[in-house]
Amino acid sequence: MNYDGNRPIYQQIIEQVEHWIASNQWQPNEKVPSVRQLAEDLDVNPTTVQRAYSVLEQEEILISQRGIGKFVTDKTDKIADLRLRLIEAHIEAFITQLQKLNLTQNEKEHIIERIVRSANE
């Protein structure tokens, strides 16, 4: 991972784990790497990974099973909400970029129509 120095690393790890889950790289009910293993893989302090995992457990994205490890939730509504939240964040960022370009409403609509048309092909 390439970390953004302007944001806490644990938050960036949360976002990465959410991406892995939303994109099905980590499947429902799949055991996730241990804190120590993910810390080693990402070259960060285990406490940082533990903090990220704790937040994800509070959000019920990850489920802890005592003595076994942590797993991706099997609650499809939680995963669907996660995907929707990530998509909304990307769309908001896209809209912000469109606004910065000082385009007319017609130009913005044309760009969006082209993107939608291209996605449906």
Image: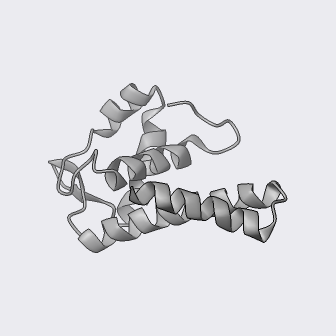
User: Farthest bottom residue?
Assistant: 77
Quarter holding residue 29: bottom left
Q: Pick whichever, 78 or 67, lies toward us.
A: 78
- Residue at 40% x, 55% y: name it: 54
**Front-most of 66 and 78?**
78
Residue 75 appears at what percent x and percent y?
24, 70
Q: Going 64% across and 57% down the picture, which residue do you hit?
A: 94
Q: Pinpoint residue 93: horizontal percent, then vertical percent.
A: 65, 57
- In the image, taking residue 29 as reference, residue 93 lies left or right, namely right
Quarter where residue 95 is shown: bottom right
- Residue at figure coordinates x 47%, y 32% from the top left: 45
Q: Position of residue 41 (x, y in %)?
A: 37, 27
Residue sticking out furthest to the right: 102
Say above or below: 49 vs 113: above
Q: Residue at x 71, y 64 (%)?
A: 108
Q: How is the image coloured?
A: one colour
Residue 77 seen in this snapshot: yes
Say which quadrant the C terminus sits in: bottom left
Give above or below for 22 relative to 74.
above
Residue 38, quarter of picture: top left
| Residue 65 vs residue 107, the one in the foreground | 107
Q: Is residue 91 visible?
A: no
Compared across the picture, whether 32 is left or right of 53 comes to: left
Q: How many marks?
A: 0
Where residue 104 appears, as percent x and y from the top left, is 81, 66
